[in-house]
Image: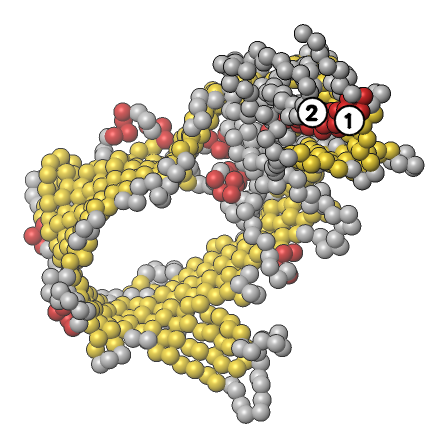
């Protein structure tokens, strides 16, 4: 078959059209490959200067090649199309949208080199993807795409490549990508990997998931242009999101090499929680309790699941002492969260054979559990447990929280509560409690306590409308409380003997109350309380042949019933002192005085039927008469008290006061005066027993409190005033003090407490909130740090949190002249004169403060002075240095029982938290 040769003009036109169309197709295809190449990295920080960095990449999926859509001019040749009826469906075109490209200077196609060049502010858009660069060159012969910066006449590089897809932005220095092999060379790149950054001079992309780097630097510093430290990796293999394998690597500090390094290393880079070894901290125990060299806080971390983990930590000392700790955290979103800590230490002092040799074991258990309020609105389970050896915080080797050494009690509570909705509402709860005095080593527990209640019932209330009058307001409810109470000692804790002497009892109560108005301005209430007490522990008393009283404890069910009546009437009286006058504007404009007087009357009947009498017989077999006759009740061992033996008819008097003032505001633009509280409360109370034989009038108790200096200083005070006199033996007698030649009342006790908190933020209009002491509270400390701050700088693995915004740099270019500081003061004084001792029993001033000498230097101190004993209380000095990616802490207790010091320097990042050095001196051994 002969073919007709097209004319020269037609061929020339067709070639020109083909070249123009091919340019667009090749440009779109090259841009697509270039986009594939950039899919490996996300969230790269901006690089304004040429640096040496490392990039890691995400896998790149191969993309289909778009089909040519050029239409050839018609020829006078008819050919049989062999694929016209091809059964295979045609491939879908890859470029389904419009590709837009531009450059400020020019876009050229070099036909000889077969290259497309976009110069100066080159930009290509396709869908949600955009790339801008100083220059973009596409080599169609070698299948290479190059994007890089421009160099101006001053030798400064500008317009680094920026790739944007959605919210992601990537900014390398330059890159060469092969569209056929999908391999690439990246120069001066940065890649974030698991909280750190890899900076590399040259990175080779081998395939979609493997990259090789040369002279890479790994750091957690925020300043990537000049990091304060990094690990230099001569050669490394990176599998993004999984691992980094490197050869010789060592630590550089400000580009100065250090001998800290490894011949090879493996770094897991999984974004998920993974198990791993916790590197211990070496040290030496100094002081009189020298236990030799040691390894502390080493162990293994188990990432059991996304909801549960476990860290097993241990300490070992060369003298044989050791410690074990199990730290667990768990959480289920929108359900509950908590943590569990079990600590055990076996302590050896001195050497075997020496007279001061001793061996002891101490332990501590902490458990905290909280339930999300939305998880179950009608039921709730919570736990707060802190129990163990009474001397744990004073003797523990690894426990260096100074504030905990001053606590004299350990408390725990585990409770479950359930509410049954309805009318009336029913509530129930089961609670186990623990209270331990670390000084006396006495432990009190309830295993468990059951409480139940039925909501108020108004039997005479109308079905429609409000309740009015004394009858309609009558209401009653039912309460029950049952306990199994145990009192034991620290030595018997968790041993069978701890249950000896346990007491079991229950009390049922039905309070009946009503309230109503009297004479419009008086509120009156009347109530009666019915109580039924059950117990399994009673006693029987009798006299033996030697004239002693013998108490025999009996086990078995017994009960008693009591009741009482009470009524009260009260009102509120408002008074106003107006200092405003016509034509004058005094500073104090008004003072308001609110009084709340109240009178109550209570009747407690005597229940003599629950009391018995016994006689003591002497050795001769005769009774000793009424002098040895004693009354007792068999319910002396009952949990919830004993029946009332004496009839009581008493009247109570109380008066509450509140003082407020309105003063002229310093702000001249304010339209209303400023309200100032003069006294939050000033209360007086006493009672008079009409049925008493003597000393009918009880002491007058006074209490009050206020806040001054914009509520920065709190003042609380109290006193007890006794109207009766004392005899020569300093005992109260039934004679008023004023009739005995004294004053109307005799001051028997008084107390005063003042606390003041101030900081540099207090002088700002909107002071920042302070959330920095939560860990101290969880560890048993105080929120004002008056007992000192926690000193365990190294072992913060499970409590430390990263900065909320690590990119926020608090250091300004010009340091503010206003130095941040804070100060907490507390003054306490107690006076006692109950038996004419006229003694100030306690007067102390405690203080705690911190000062930031510079943006990254801070010092602090916690101490106090006891004016009665003329000596300083426990004192702690603190020094802290923020070294950007590092932190340094030093604390010092110069004297006292817990004299010690602690030094620490380490990396802040949790990824490299094992890279640290700490040295401490333990407190001297206490015998």
Out of 728 and 584, give the one closest to the viewer: 584
| Image side of residue 571 versus residue 716, left or right | left
Out of 73 and 780, give the one closest to the viewer: 73
Would residue 236 be seen by someone viewing this image from the given angle? no
| Image side of residue 624 versus residue 51, left or right | left
Q: Which residue is drawn at the image coordinates 7% and 43% (left, top)?
A: 622
Out of 82 and 709, give the one closest to the viewer: 82
Q: How many marks?
A: 2
Residue 55, given in percent of the width and then of the height, sits at 69, 24
Element type where label 1 sits in the image: helix
Residue 701, given in percent of the width and then of the height, sits at 36, 65
| Image side of residue 92 versus residue 556, left or right | right
Residue occupied by mark 2: 73
Instruction: Tell me which colouring the rendered structure shows.
Output: secondary structure
Outermost right residue? 153
Residue occupied by mark 1: 13
Residue 146, given in percent of the width and then of the height, sits at 77, 25
Is residue 8 depicted above or below 535 in this figure?
A: above
Q: Which residue is drawn at the image coordinates 62% and 49% (left, top)?
A: 849
Q: Quick check: marks 1 and 2 in contact, CB under 8 Å?
A: yes
Counting residues from the start of the chain, the first of labels 1 and 2 encountered is: 1
How packed mark 1 is, by other alpha carbons closer than 10 Å (few <14, some 14-19, many 20 or more), is few
Q: Which residue is drawn at the image coordinates 22% and 41% (left, top)?
A: 450
As measured in the structure, the alpha-carbon distance from the residue carrying label 1 to the one carrying label 2 is 10 Å
Query: Which quadrant holds residue 249?
Result: top right
Numbered mark located on residue 217 in the image: none
Q: Which residue is drawn at the image coordinates 61% and 36% (left, top)?
A: 128
Element type where label 2 sits in the image: loop
Query: Which quadrant holds residue 650?
Result: bottom left
Out of 500 and 617, give the one closest to the viewer: 500
Is residue 869 depicted above or below 394 in this figure?
A: below
């Amino acid at each position: 078959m002969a073919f007709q040769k097209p004319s020269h003009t037609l061929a020339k036109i067709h070639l020109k059209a083909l070249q123009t169309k091919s340019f667009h197709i090749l440009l779109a295809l090259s841009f697509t490959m270039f986009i594939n190449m950039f899919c490996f990295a996300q969230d790269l920080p901006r690089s304004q200067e040429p640096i040496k960095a490392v990039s890691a990449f995400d896998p790149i999926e191969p993309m289909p090649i778009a089909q040519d859509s050029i239409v050839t001019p018609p020829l006078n040749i008819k050919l049989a199309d062999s694929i016209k009826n091809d059964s295979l469906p045609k491939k879908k075109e890859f470029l389904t949208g419009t590709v837009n490209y531009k450059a400020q200077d020019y876009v050229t196609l070099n036909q000889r080199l077969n290259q497309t060049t976009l110069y100066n502010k080159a930009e290509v858009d396709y869908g949600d993807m955009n790339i801008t660069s100083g220059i973009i060159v596409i080599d169609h012969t070698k299948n290479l795409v190059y994007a890089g910066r421009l160099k101006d006449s001053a030798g400064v590089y500008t317009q680094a490549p920026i790739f944007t897809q959605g919210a992601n932005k990537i900014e390398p220095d330059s890159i060469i990508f092969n569209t056929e092999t999908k391999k690439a060379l990246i120069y001066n790149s940065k890649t974030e990997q698991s909280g750190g950054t890899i900076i590399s001079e040259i990175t080779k992309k081998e395939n979609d998931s493997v990259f090789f780097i040369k002279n890479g630097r790994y750091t957690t510093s925020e300043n990537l242009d000049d990091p304060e430290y990094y690990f230099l990796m001569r050669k490394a293999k990176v599998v993004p999101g999984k691992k980094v394998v490197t050869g010789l690597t060592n630590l550089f500090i400000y580009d100065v090499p250090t001998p800290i390094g490894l011949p090879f290393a493996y770094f897991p880079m999984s974004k998920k929680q993974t198990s791993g070894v916790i590197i211990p901290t070496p040290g030496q125990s100094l002081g009189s309790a020298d236990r030799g060299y040691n390894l502390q806080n080493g162990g293994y971390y188990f990432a059991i699941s996304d909801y549960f983990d476990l860290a097993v930590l241990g300490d070992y000392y060369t003298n044989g002492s050791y410690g074990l700790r199990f730290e667990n955290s768990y959480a289920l979103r929108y359900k509950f969260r908590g943590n569990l800590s079990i600590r055990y230490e076996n302590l050896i002092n001195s050497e075997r054979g020496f007279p001061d040799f001793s061996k002891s074991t101490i332990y501590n258990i902490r458990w905290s559990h909280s339930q999300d309020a939305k998880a179950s609105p009608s039921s709730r389970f919570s736990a707060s447990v802190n129990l163990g050896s009474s001397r744990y915080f004073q003797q523990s080797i690894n426990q260096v929280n100074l504030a905990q050494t001053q606590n004299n009690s350990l408390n725990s509570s585990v409770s479950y509560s359930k509410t049954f909705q309805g009318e009336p509402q029913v509530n129930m709860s089961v609670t186990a409690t623990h209270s331990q005095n670390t000084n006396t080593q006495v432990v009190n527990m309830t295993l468990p306590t059951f409480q139940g209640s039925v909501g108020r019932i108004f039997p005479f209330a109308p079905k429609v409308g409000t309740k009015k009058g004394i009858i309609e307001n009558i209401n009653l409810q039912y309460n029950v409380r049952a306990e199994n109470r145990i009192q034991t000692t620290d030595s018997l804790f968790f041993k069978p003997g701890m249950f000896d002497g346990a007491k079991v009892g229950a009390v049922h109560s039905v309070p009946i109350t009503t309230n109503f108005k009297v004479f419009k301005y008086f509120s009156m209430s009347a109530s009666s309380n019915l109580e039924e007490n059950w117990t399994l522990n009673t006693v029987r008393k009798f006299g033996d042949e030697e004239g002693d009283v013998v108490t025999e404890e009996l086990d078995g069910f017994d009960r008693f019933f009591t009741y009482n009546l009470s009524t009260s009437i009260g009102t509120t009286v408002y008074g106003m002192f107006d200092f405003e006058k016509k034509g004058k504007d005094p500073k104090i404009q008004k003072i308001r005085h609110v009084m709340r007087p109240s009178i109550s009357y209570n009747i407690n009947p005597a229940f003599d039927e629950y009391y018995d009498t016994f006689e003591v017989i002497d050795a001769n077999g005769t009774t000793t008469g009424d002098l040895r006759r004693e009354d007792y009740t068999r319910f002396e061992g009952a949990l919830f008290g004993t029946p009332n033996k004496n009839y009581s008819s008493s009247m109570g008097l109380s008066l509450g006061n509140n003082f407020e003032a309105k003063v002229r505001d310093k702000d001249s633009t304010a339209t209303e005066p400023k309200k100032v509280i003069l006294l939050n409360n000033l209360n007086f109370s006493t009672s008079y027993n009409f049925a008493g034989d003597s000393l009918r009038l009880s002491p007058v108790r006074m209490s009050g409190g206020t806040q001054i200096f914009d509520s920065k200083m709190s003042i609380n005070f109290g006193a007890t005033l006794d109207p009766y006199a004392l005899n020569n033996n300093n005992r109260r007698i039934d004679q008023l003090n004023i009739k005995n030649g004294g004053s109307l009342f005799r001051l028997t006790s008084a107390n005063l407490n003042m606390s003041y908190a101030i900081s540099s933020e207090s002088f700002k209009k909107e002071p920042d909130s302070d959330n920095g002491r939560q860990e101290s509270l969880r560890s048993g400390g105080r929120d004002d740090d008056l007992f000192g701050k926690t000193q365990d700088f190294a072992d913060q693995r499970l409590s430390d949190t990263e900065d909320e915004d690590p990119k926020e740099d608090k250091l300004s270019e010009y340091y503010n002249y206003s130095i941040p500081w804070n100060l907490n003061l507390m003054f306490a004084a107690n006076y006692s004169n109950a038996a004419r001792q006229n003694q100030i029993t306690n007067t102390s001033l405690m203080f705690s403060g911190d000062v930031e000498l510079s943006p990254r230097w801070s010092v602090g101190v916690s101490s106090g002075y006891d004016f009665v004993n003329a000596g300083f209380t426990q004192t702690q000095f603190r020094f802290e240095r923020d070294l950007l990616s590092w932190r340094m802490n030093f604390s010092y207790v110069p004297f006292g029982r817990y004299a010690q010091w602690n030094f620490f320097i380490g990396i802040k990042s949790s990824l490299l938290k094992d890279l640290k050095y700490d040295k401490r001196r333990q407190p001297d051994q206490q015998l």
